[in-house]
């Protein structure tokens, strides 16, 4: 890659649509919070913790990830995590981001809904006023838990729903099919919220189809295994349902063996509405610019494809017309000057 393309990517205004706040907790902050809260995370040093970031699949990652998030106890902890991510990606020229929070992971440890939501939303408000970055919040249900647990979590969070743009589905995919949450998602849709679901990361193309048909999602998180079903690929191209693709995540969790094997360019060239995202940047070795740069180099994205990925994210964001117009104008002005 020429330095020209790297610089072009780094300075480009960006929108991120798939990022787990708990997966943005860097090892240094994780260690600081563990000390502050006297939580034993089972690692002697930051270096030892980072050395454990050698995953063989989604489950081996989630084990480390769920262990790490136990350091989040107070409102200030949730603030610090959210602020650290937002200020970090602002330096990647991210202008708008939509972040996931998994309430069940915290509620079952005895953390109050208000504790996590107050910290996260205070950081989002500060980042908007101090950094000019806007951020939507998406609450993700963990699919390994029951439908009843998802409904109970939804009810427990009703007082905070005004701070939320949508709901999603994460956690161990295989064996926890999207359809398990069809009734939960139907109720949430009726309330007017946006819906997303992880599908087609470790699960096959049938999980992607089920997320679309049984859950009626507005975006698919990952979705890369849709390629195993040619008819589905054509349907996704026709419907233009956005896919929030996370190449470095897919590499770290061995969805692909080499980044060169990643299908993001093929999906884009087949007409799918693909976007670029970081997923769990502290665990997977990269924020937005790292994902764009490494992927561009590995699969040979053209300048026009980089522009299309960024445009797709603007059009797929859960924002009002005014904010979408601002984001679109910023991106188009950037490219017009190139
Ligand atoms: N939670 C955090 N990261 C995830 C991923 N990549 N897949 C499913 N659930 C997740
Ligand atoms: Zn994810």
Image (spheres, rainbow, N blue to C red):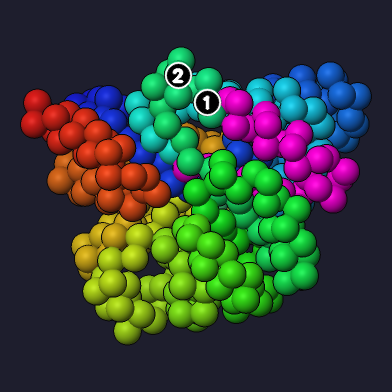
Based on the displayed image, in which of its 4 quarters is residue 94 positioned? top left
Which residue is at 67% across, 29% downward?
119
* Residue 202 vertical placement versus 338 (above, below): below
Residue that sits furthest to the top in the current view? 130
Vertically, is 277 above or below 235?
above
Q: Secondary structure at mark 2?
A: helix
Secondary structure under tag 1 reads helix
Q: Is residue 337 left or right of residue 261?
A: left
Disc 2, ligand 2: is the CB inside 8 Å? Answer: no
Query: What whole-number distance in Å separates the C-alpha atoms at marks 1 and 2?
Result: 6 Å
Magenta-colored span: 98-123
> Relative to the observer, which residue lies in front, 268 or 170?
170
**Pointers 1 and 2 in contact (CB under 8 A)?**
yes
Res. 263 image quadrant: bottom left
* Residue wearing tag 1: 125
What number of labels is visible? 2
Is 162 magenta? The answer is: no
Q: Residue at x 35, y 60 (%)?
A: 242
Residue behind mark 2: 129
């Amino acid at each position: 890659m020429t330095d020209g393309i790297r610089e072009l990517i780094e300075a480009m205004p960006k929108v991120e649509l798939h990022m787990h706040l708990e997966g943005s907790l860097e090892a240094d902050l994780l260690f600081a919070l563990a000390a502050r809260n006297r939580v034993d995370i089972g690692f002697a040093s930051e270096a030892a913790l980072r050395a454990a970031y050698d995953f063989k699949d989604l489950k081996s990652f989630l084990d480390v990830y769920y262990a790490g998030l136990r350091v989040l106890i107070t409102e200030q902890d949730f603030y610090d995590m959210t602020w650290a991510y937002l200020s970090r990606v602002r330096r990647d020229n991210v202008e708008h981001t939509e972040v996931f929070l998994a309430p069940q992971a915290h509620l079952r440890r005895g953390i109050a809904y208000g504790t996590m939501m107050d910290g996260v939303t205070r950081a989002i408000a500060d980042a908007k006023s101090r950094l000019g970055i806007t951020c939507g919040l998406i609450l993700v249900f963990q699919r390994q838990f029951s439908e009843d647990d998802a409904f109970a979590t939804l009810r427990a969070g009703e007082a905070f729903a005004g701070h939320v743009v949508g709901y999603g589905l994460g956690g161990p995919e295989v064996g926890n099919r999207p359809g398990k949450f069809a009734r939960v998602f139907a109720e949430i849709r009726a309330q007017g919220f946006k819906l997303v679901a992880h599908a087609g990361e470790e699960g096959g193309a049938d999980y992607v189809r089920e997320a679309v048909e049984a859950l009626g999602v507005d975006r698919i998180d990952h979705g890369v295994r849709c390629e195993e079903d040619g008819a589905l690929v054509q349907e996704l191209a026709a419907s233009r349902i956005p896919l929030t693709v996370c190449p470095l995540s897919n590499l770290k969790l061995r969805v692909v063996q080499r980044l060169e094997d990643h299908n993001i360019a093929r999906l884009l060239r087949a007409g799918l509405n693909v976007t670029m995202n970081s997923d769990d940047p502290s665990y997977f070795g990269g924020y937005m610019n790292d994902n764009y740069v490494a992927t561009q180099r590995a699969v040979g994205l053209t300048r026009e494809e980089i522009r299309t990925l960024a445009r797709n994210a603007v059009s797929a964001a859960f924002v009002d017309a005014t904010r979408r117009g601002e984001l679109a104008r910023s991106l188009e002005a950037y490219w017009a000057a190139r």
